[in-house]
Amino acid sequence: MSIPQDPMILYSFVNTQLRDKYPSLEEFCRAYGCDKTELLQRMSAVGFDYDAEHNRFA
């Protein structure tokens, strides 16, 4: 399964999945077959950083 390419849709999609299904970013990446480092870089490029304590991008 692929993840959205648009940064704002990706932000919303990932946070929704983390809230509803996955207790960690690692589990999300494993389920979707995406590289965690690449996802972190993509999100950081548009101003969002991962908050592990709250399991979301902000």
Image: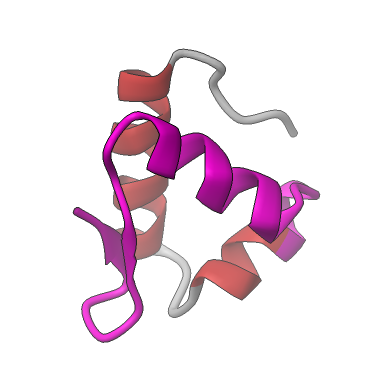
Place of residue 24 in the rendered image (x, y in percent of width and height, measured from the top left): 48, 77
Q: Is residue 36 magenta?
A: yes
Residue depicted at x 80% and y 49%: 33
Place of residue 50 in the rendered image (x, y in percent of width and height, measured from the top left): 35, 63
Q: Is residue 55 magenta?
A: yes
Write down the quadrant of residue 7 in the picture. Answer: top left
In this view, which residue lies farthest toward the right? Answer: 33
Residue depicted at x 54% and y 21%: 4
| Span shown in magenta | 30-58
Q: How many marks?
A: 0
In this view, which residue lies farthest toward the top? Answer: 6
Say which quadrant the N terminus sits in. top right
Is residue 43 found left or right of 25 in the rendered image?
A: left
In this view, which residue lies farthest toward the bottom? Answer: 53
Is residue 57 found left or right of 40 in the rendered image?
A: left
Residue nearer the viewer, 41 or 1: 41
Write down the quadrant of residue 36 in the picture. Answer: bottom right
- Tell me if residue 27 comes above or below residue 15 in the rendering: below
Residue depicted at x 26% and y 86%: 53
Write down the quadrant of residue 48 in the picture. Answer: top left
Residue nearer the viewer, 50 or 47: 47
Place of residue 32 in the rendered image (x, y in percent of width and height, measured from the top left): 71, 48
Place of residue 13 in the rendered image (x, y in percent of width and height, measured from the top left): 38, 36
